[in-house]
Amino acid sequence: MTDVNYSDLRLITGDTPNEFTITIDGKEVLVSDSSNNIVDIAKSAGITIPAPCYLNKRKHGCCSACVVEINGKQHYACGTKPLAGMEVVVKRDDLVALRKERLLKYKDSIDRGVPLKCGSK
Ligand code: FES
């Protein structure tokens, strides 16, 4: 029986043990740093997920506008780390409408000076 040299598998798959793929809107995306969240991983693949509070270090509370669907359930992309095989949906009419609604609510909260609480959907 031949011993398997796992370093040779990298030559075959192109992956290192710390790399894996997820799917975003049907596009396979290689993840090489699993400490990044879905917002940053999508951005690296040219896919934009609105994330104003994350990008502004939650200065005005939490927007909830980064909502995406992951494996059939809604999640906040800014608070979700990637796992191998995840299937993320960003561009779908109902999700786009939900993000738009939440962005407007977030903008209104800033205009009123009342930060939105984090963790509310
Ligand atoms: S970017 Fe605001 S909750 Fe995720």
Image (cartoon, rainbow, N blue to C red):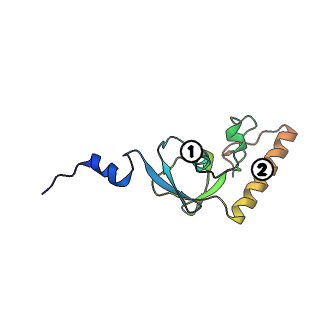
108, above or below 1, in the image: above
Identity of the residue drawn at 71% across and 36% down = 56
In this orientation, which residue lies closer to the viewer: 34 or 61?
34
Which residue is the extreme one toward the left?
Answer: 1
Identity of the residue drawn at 33% across and 54% down = 12
Q: Residue 10: percent from the left, percent from the top?
A: 34, 49
Estimate how packed mark 1 is, as few (under 14), some (14 to 19) or many (20 or more) residues with alpha carbons within 10 Å.
some
Left/right placement of residue 118 relative to residue 40 reads right
Q: Residue 75: percent from the left, percent from the top?
A: 61, 54
Q: Residue 21: percent from the left, percent from the top?
A: 47, 54
Estimate how packed mark 2 is, as few (under 14), some (14 to 19) or many (20 or more) residues with alpha carbons within 10 Å.
many
Which residue is the extreme one toward the right?
Answer: 112
Secondary structure under tag 2 reads helix
50, above or below 70, in the image: above
Determine which quarter of the picture holds residue 55: top right
Q: Residue 77: percent from the left, percent from the top?
A: 61, 49
Determine which quarter of the picture holds residue 111: top right
Label 2 or label 1, whichever comes before in sequence order:
1
Identity of the residue drawn at 69% across and 45% down = 51
Determine which quarter of the picture holds residue 61: top right
Which quadrant of the figure shows ligand 1? top right
Query: In the rendered image, which residue does mark 2 sit on?
Result: 103
Amino acid at dot 1: Asn
Query: In the rendered image, which residue does mark 1 sit on?
Result: 37
Instruction: Decide if ligand 1 comes within 8 Å of the CB at mark 2.
Output: no
